[in-house]
Image (cartoon, helix red, strand yellow):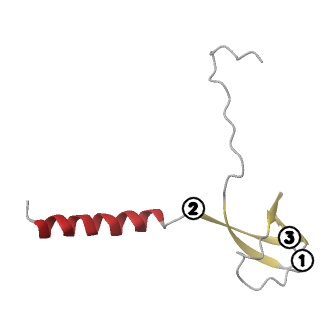
Amino acid sequence: MNPRILSLMVAFSLVFSSAALAAGAKTYQITGTVVAATGSMVTVQKGTERWEIDLDPATTKGSAELKVGSTVTVTYVMSATKIETAPAAGSPAATP
């Protein structure tokens, strides 16, 4: 195979694979009324649902002048902090 074609194929695969990995987690939005706000958390009421969202000052962007009663749109990502596995259904449980 021609070395030029091979190197172009490798370059394209590296560019596209890094772009796919850099995409990150899917983002979500909620718009509602601020019910409570502290420096580390905001509670938003949307209809009958209450959303408590932690704020990280290092990564949170925007004007964070949160006042109770104001309408806000919060953009967030879901991320896991801990994952545990359980034995599959029907398999015998391990004895301690």
Instruction: Report if residue 21 is visible in the image.
Output: yes
- Amino acid bearing label 1: Gly
Whole-Å distance between the Cαs marked 1 and 2? 30 Å
- Amino acid bearing label 3: Ser
The percent position of residue 44, horizontal first and vertical second, equals 82, 67
Viewer-side label of 1, 3 = 3
The percent position of residue 1, horizontal first and vertical second, equals 8, 59
Q: Which element carries disc 3, helix, strand or loop? A: loop
Q: Which element carries disc 1, helix, strand or loop? A: loop
Whole-Å distance between the Cαs marked 1 and 3? 18 Å
Nearer-N-terminus badge (3/2): 2
Instruction: Report if residue 46 is visible in the image.
Output: no
- Amino acid bearing label 2: Ala
Q: In this view, does 86 lie above or below 76?
A: above
Q: In which quarter of the image is the C terminus?
A: top right
The residue that appears at 62% across and 23% down in the rendered structure is: 88
Nearer-N-terminus badge (1/3): 3
Q: Which element carries disc 2, helix, strand or loop? A: loop
Nearer-N-terminus badge (1/2): 2
Q: Residues within 10 Å of mark 1 (few under 14, many from 20)?
A: few
- Number of the label disc, if any, that sits on residue 69: 1
Tell me the residue that label 2 is attached to. Answer: 25
Tell me the residue that label 3 is attached to. Answer: 40
Q: Which of these two is toward me, 87 or 8?
A: 8
